[in-house]
Amino acid sequence: MDRDLDPRLEPLARRMRDRGQPPERDLWPGIDEAIDRRERAGDHPARTGWWRFAAAVAAMLVLVLGARDLHVPRGDSTPGGTPSPVVAEAAATWALDGLDEEAAIESALAELNAAMAADPDNPHLSRLALMVHRSRGEMLRRSGETAQRTG
Amino acid sequence: MDPQLGNHGAARPDHEDMDLVNRSNAGDRAAFESIYRRYVDRIYGTSLRLTADRVEAEGLTQDTFVRAWFSLAGYSGQGSLGGWLARVAVNLWRDRFRSDKRRDRLQGQLTAELAAGPALPVDPRDRGGVIPLLTALDLEWAVAQLPPGARTVFVLHDVEGFKHREIGEMLGLATGTVKAHLHRARRLLRGMLADEREETHGS
């Protein structure tokens, strides 16, 4: 708020904004009906804001681990079947940074579990979760082999 | 400025809001109705100040909540949920405003208002006696008496917290012109306040 506004008006303007005004009739039935109408016409809420992030994390993980010869088909690493250039670049950076595989897998699984709780019918998430679990198994197997060799 | 924050401080979402948002994002329509109940007064108030028409304000409020249902995943939890909804309402109003004749009409009014100078459009005493311009309700009334251009700029800047530049882009005005209208709107409101004080202390 700049100083041109009378100091007496500033708190009033804020209260005016926050208090608002009640409409003369309940608008909810019209809103509910409009939402139903749009959904029947094929519109669906974009509930993907954060599960996309979770999916990207999982996809990056699969790409990184896939690049390390974990027998994960690269073409299956994203919902669309082909890794996006952004994901591939991020995956490469991640690999170069030497990310802790175990921490990355646990983090990806946590993200995916939360995403699946919010969107249980999403087939892409289920598929990614399966791939991350597979990667986790491979990582554990490889850790065991390494321990045997060094032990 | 983060439009979710406005000029009135960094409001933060409360836990109940975030719970309602998460449940709505999971498809819980009852949770979304609770969001509506919490914020309908704020959104209708914003809509009414922008449109100055009860029927249009109802339509804008309704469309705001319908749009919010389909795009609630875009609310990141940064800033208040009320601020985010108000931004949706203002964006919808701006889109309609851009596409119809009201923009031309308002721009004409803005030009005429600046040329007319600072005279009060309505004598506050015509309201029926002394106006105690000391509450938000009274300011609401006073703002409603402003000429359309001054009211729009005042509401967008001082109430909703948009920047001069953003308002200029919405209304198709230079930033300097927006500042001139804002200055005029504030002067008009101060005039009403001074009149009230004169009435109160002079009697």
Image (cartoon, rainbow, N blue to C red):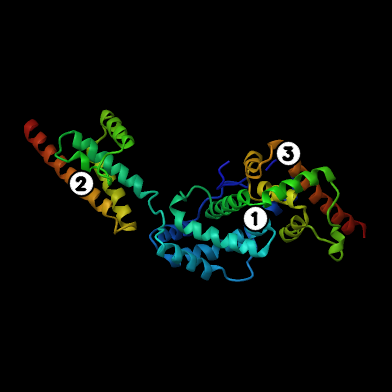
Label pair 1/2, CB-CB below 8 angstroms: no
Q: Nearer the viewer, residue B98 or B51?
A: B98
Q: Nearer the viewer, residue A42 or A9?
A: A42
Q: Are marks 2 and 3 on the same chain?
A: no
Is there any visible trace of residue B73 in the rendered image?
yes
Closer to the eye: label 3 or 1:
3
Q: For label 1, count other residues whose C-alpha is less than 10 Å away and answer few (under 14), some (14-19) or many (20+).
A: many
- Report the side of A4 relative to B161 (left or right): right
User: Picture coordinates of residue A30 (x, y %)?
Assistant: 53, 68
Q: Eyeballing the image, is A103 above or below A43?
A: above
- The picture places residue B166, in percent across and down from the top left corner, at 62, 41
Q: Is residue A91 above or below residue A44?
A: above
Q: Is residue A42 left or right of residue B149?
A: left
Q: Amino acid at mark 1?
A: Arg
- Provide the chain ID for the residue under circle 2: A
Q: Residue at x 82, y 53 (%)?
A: B193
Residue closest to the far front? B101
| Mark in the foreground, 2 or 3 | 3
Identify the chain of the residue marked 1, using the numbered disc in the image: A
Residue ID for mark 1: A17
Kind of residue at disc 3 = Thr
Same chain, labels 1 and 2: yes
Residue with the most extreme right position:
B203
For the point 84% across and 59% down, the residue is: B124
Tag 2 secondary structure: helix
Secondary structure beneath disc 3? helix
**Distance between mark 2 and mark 3 Cα atoms:** 58 Å
Residue that carries the numbered disc 3 in the rendered image: B177
Q: Quadrant of the image for the C terminus of chain B?
A: bottom right
What amino acid is labelled 2 in the image?
A: Met
Indicate which disc residue A131 carries: 2
Q: In which quarter of the view is residue B174 placed? A: top right
